[in-house]
């Protein structure tokens, strides 16, 4: 990830839109907004750490999938695939913008109970209706196409080789912020430490930076990742988002597989996939999954030995002899209300716009979410995908979105 040098302060003391958080969600919104011919305002992105060392964007496993149970989530990922494969065209055919592809090894969901098998069938029906290339596979089908799996306990699989797999998320992120800055968006290396609301409490009128400046704003976007609640507190509001730790291991195998390994969602909850031509990647979390401190990235080595490795060796016997070559812990910005995006305006502070709680599928959703938020900021409504089901008002009204394919 290229590290760009941001100034401490912006060029103006008033902006039409202030975005708090400059990782991929904030930068996607900034770019889509800056290239919208119907928006002619000033945009400020405030980022507390321009290295993005501890951001969820930097710790991502960078995959996308069509295999959701809710149609809107499928449509969102379909746009992600369109955007990634056509990024140069989206960015005015700039020859410096790379032509990207998706490494389509696909996701392989494995069901070992009749209940989960039925969930896969129901989701498959929704995915087919949305035009996704998902196919259901019997254990015999799975063994025929991927002989390395142990499927003795498996009743059904779900797989898709169309626009599903690995993509270069960091490259997309780099170009979103680079192009946003070229379009006149001000990025600053600073931190919002306070907000001033109107007398009626219905609007955020200004923010105060750690360096002391006060900046007026027309609209404010909370793109603070796992720290979403800290940004909310300054406006006197709440959001059900917290950081939860997710672990990743990259490993080699003494006896490598003879074909690409799909991103396999094991019934245990452990997931693993191909990582380049000769390595593999596994991810998971502890059974007890609490919120953690924002600076807690310590590895749990017992989790690998006691849970992850035994699952790998059971599901793929060739993974009995493997060697970890790299490992890290990152944070999901977990929406513990319903594990789906939280978007749109607050119910009382009307110019406070949420872009939070993506619960592990944010990177693949960032093109559509940035586009949608830019549309809302410009028009007060959506012109492409209707994102109103994700609006914040569902939380106080206790209307969770049911998405059965949460990893």
Image (tube, helix red, strand yellow):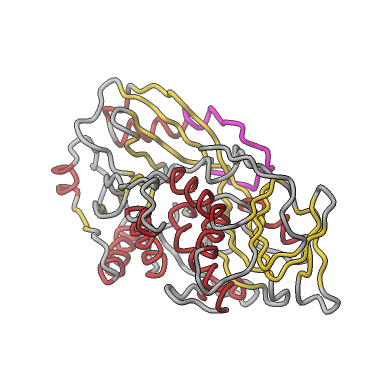
**The magenta segment:** 287-305
Residue 294 is covered by the magenta coloring: yes
**Does the image show residue 299?**
yes
Relative to 160, residue 331 above or below: above
Residue at horizontal 81%, vertical 57%?
208
Q: Position of residue 232 (x, y in %)?
A: 72, 61
Q: Position of residue 109 (x, y in %)?
A: 31, 51
363 and 177: which one is in front? 177
How many marks can you see?
0
Give the residue drawn at x 66%, y 37%: 296
Q: Viewed as shown, does residue 144 lie left or right of 80? A: left
Q: Is residue 78 left or right of residue 325?
A: left
Magenta region includes residue 239: no
Left/right of residue 46 with respect to residue 302 in the rendered view:
right
Residue at 55% from the left image edge and 45% from the top image edge: 56
Q: Nearer the viewer, residue 343 or 40?
A: 40
Residue drawn at the location 30% of the way across and 27% of the way down: 278
Residue 239 higher or lower than 137, as above or below: below
State the predominant SS element of the stretch in magenta. Answer: loop
Image height of 375 relative to 355, above or below: below
For residue 403, which quarter of the picture?
A: bottom left
* Position in image of residue 133 (x %, y %): 23, 60
Q: Quadrant of residue 249?
A: top left
Q: Answer yes or no: is residue 156 visible.
A: no
Q: Is residue 29 left or right of residue 193?
A: left
């Amino acid at each position: 990830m290229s590290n760009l040098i941001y100034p401490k302060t912006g060029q103006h003391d008033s902006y039409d839109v202030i975005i708090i958080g400059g990782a991929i969600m904030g930068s996607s919104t900034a770019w889509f907004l800056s290239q919208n011919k119907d928006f002619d305002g000033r945009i400020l992105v405030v980022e507390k750490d321009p290295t993005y060392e501890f951001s969820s964007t930097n710790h991502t496993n960078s995959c996308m999938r069509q295999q959701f149970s809710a149609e809107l989530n499928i449509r969102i990922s379909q746009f992600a695939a369109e955007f990634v494969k056509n990024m140069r065209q989206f960015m005015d055919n700039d020859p410096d913008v790379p032509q990207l592809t998706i490494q389509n090894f696909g996701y392989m969901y494995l069901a070992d109970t009749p209940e989960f098998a039925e969930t896969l069938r129901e989701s498959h029906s929704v995915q087919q209706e949305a035009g996704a290339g998902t196919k259901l596979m019997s254990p015999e089908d799975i063994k025929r196409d991927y002989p390395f799996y142990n499927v003795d306990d498996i009743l059904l699989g779900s797989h898709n080789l169309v626009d599903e797999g690995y993509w270069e998320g960091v490259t997309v992120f780099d170009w979103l912020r680079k192009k946003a800055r070229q379009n006149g968006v001000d990025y600053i290396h600073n931190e919002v430490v306070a907000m001033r609301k109107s007398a009626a409490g219905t609007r955020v009128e200004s923010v105060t930076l750690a360096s002391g400046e006060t900046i007026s704003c027309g609209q404010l976007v909370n793109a603070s990742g796992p720290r979403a609640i800290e940004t909310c507190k300054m406006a006197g509001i709440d959001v059900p988002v917290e950081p939860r730790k997710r672990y990743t291991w990259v490993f080699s195998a003494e006896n490598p597989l003879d074909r690409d390994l799909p991103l396999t969602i094991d019934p245990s909850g452990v997931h693993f996939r191909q990582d380049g031509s000769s390595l593999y990647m596994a991810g998971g979390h502890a059974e007890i999954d609490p919120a953690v401190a924002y600076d807690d990235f310590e590895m749990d080595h017992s989790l690998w030995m006691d849970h992850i490795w035994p699952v790998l060796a059971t599901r793929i016997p060739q993974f009995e002899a493997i060697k970890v070559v790299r490992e890290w812990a990152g944070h999901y910005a977990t929406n513990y209300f319903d594990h789906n995006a939280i978007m749109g305006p607050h119910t009382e502070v009307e110019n406070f716009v949420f872009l939070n709680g993506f619960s592990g599928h944010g990177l693949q959703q960032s093109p559509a979410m940035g586009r949608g938020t830019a549309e809302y900021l410009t028009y007060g409504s959506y012109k492409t995908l209707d994102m109103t089901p994700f609006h914040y008002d569902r939380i106080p009204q206790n209307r969770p979105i049911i998405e059965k394919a949460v990893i």
